[in-house]
Amino acid sequence: MSTDQAAAGPLAGIRVIELGGIGPGPFCGMILADLGAEVIRIDRPAEHGTRTRHPILHRGRRSVTLDLKNPVGAATALRLIDTADALIEGFRPGVTERLGLGPDVCQARNPRLVYGRMTGWGQDGPLAQEPGHDINYIAVAGALGAIGPADGDPVVPLNLVGDMGGGGMLLALGIAAALVSARTTGRGQVVDAAMTDGTAIQLALIHGLLASGRWTDRRASNLFDGGAPFYRTYRCADGLHLAVGSVEPQFYAALLDVIGLTDDPLFAAQHDTAAWPRMADGLGEVFATRTRDQWAAAFEGRGACVTPVLDFAEAAAHHHNAARGTYTTEGGLLQPGPAPRFLGTPSATPAPAPVIGSHTAEVLAEAGLDAATMAALREQRVVGGDRSA
């Protein structure tokens, strides 16, 4: 690791090779880098010298350009993988095997390697070779159909459920767990992280409610899908919104107290689902009488679980987030800071995303390649960069 990347965080001393991809794979690499791992990303030579389109997802890395379709490039990548504790790849099943970089080859050379595989459908199954995106994976896993208004269409929850939570974050957890196992056993393993699986496991609570008869298949008729009048958003006088999460009785009582509906019989039975639509209409009428920020001020410190719905800039400036440093501005870019937080081994401030390929010579020299070999690789376009260098 270069001297400007001081080791910090609970994964300090761990080296990860990331085979360049999009979406959840880079998010996994970002998390591991934020937690202190040295992450080396391998990008395509054609991109050498350009700036990434994903300046936050690619933060904290060193970047090497290698043509993995060229046998010489793949062999050079193997030299880097030999030195690694973990690898991240997000290609369709079988692609790294065809490149000569599959888990059997890599782990035969480096038995302690944790080989992390990020896909939408998984390494096997009828859809394993089909293309897809977050929206497709969360649809088939059952999550998308549960999100949205009762009489409208399912609502896309950004790409948080599949790509990020059920994808990159799940793979980061899997790699971390496998690294612990490798430290104990001396042997790595393959981590098969599929976004369909990751989406499904996030539905554990909902499936539990469904099994106990406390959930229905009809959207916006349940406790956590906007059906409950005390767990949904409301439009205020200025067109902005409040988030109401007054689930427990004491929070519900505080909600009614602040808005002056404690004695209204309509709201006496909190869990009377037949009354929920009329209760929601009544709350909507009240919330429409003031602006969002007026209501936020009224609920501040009242313990009702009612908060303003903020945009990105407002969220960064919110006094709670500001006090904790939840968001930071590095290199002129507003971005979330590393999470979770470790009191014994705190993470460092993430380094900016590198110019693609800017660490090629440095990293390959560390792997033992001399100047003549580097020049030959440039001449053959196996690595990016000026061939006259």
Image (cartoon, rainbow, N blue to C red):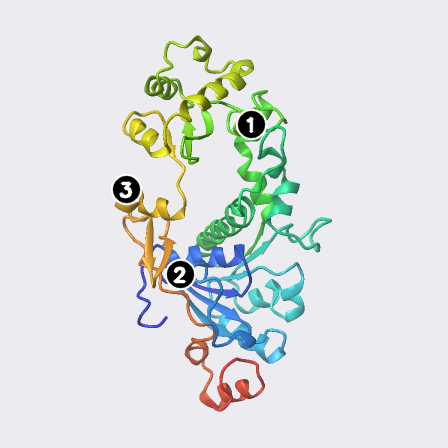
Q: Is residue 81 visible?
A: no
Q: Amino acid at mark 3?
A: His
| Residue 352 occupies quadrant | bottom left
Above or below, 229 relative to 67: above
Residue placed under numbered mark 1 in the picture:
208
In this rendering, position of residue 284 left or right of residue 95: left
How many neighbours does mark 1 have within 10 angstroms: few (below 14), some (14-19), or many (20 or more)? few
Residue on which disc 3 sits: 319
Under mark 2, the amino acid is Ala
Circles 2 and 3 in contact, beta carbons < 8 Å: no
Helix, strand, or loop for circle 3? helix
**Counting other residues with Cα less than 10 Å from the Cα at mark 3, is it few (<14), some (14-19), or many (20 or more)?**
few
Callout 1 secondary element: helix
Q: Residue furthest right?
A: 126
Q: Report the Cα–Cα distance between label 2 and label 1.
A: 36 Å
Q: Determine which residue is flagged by label 2.
A: 37
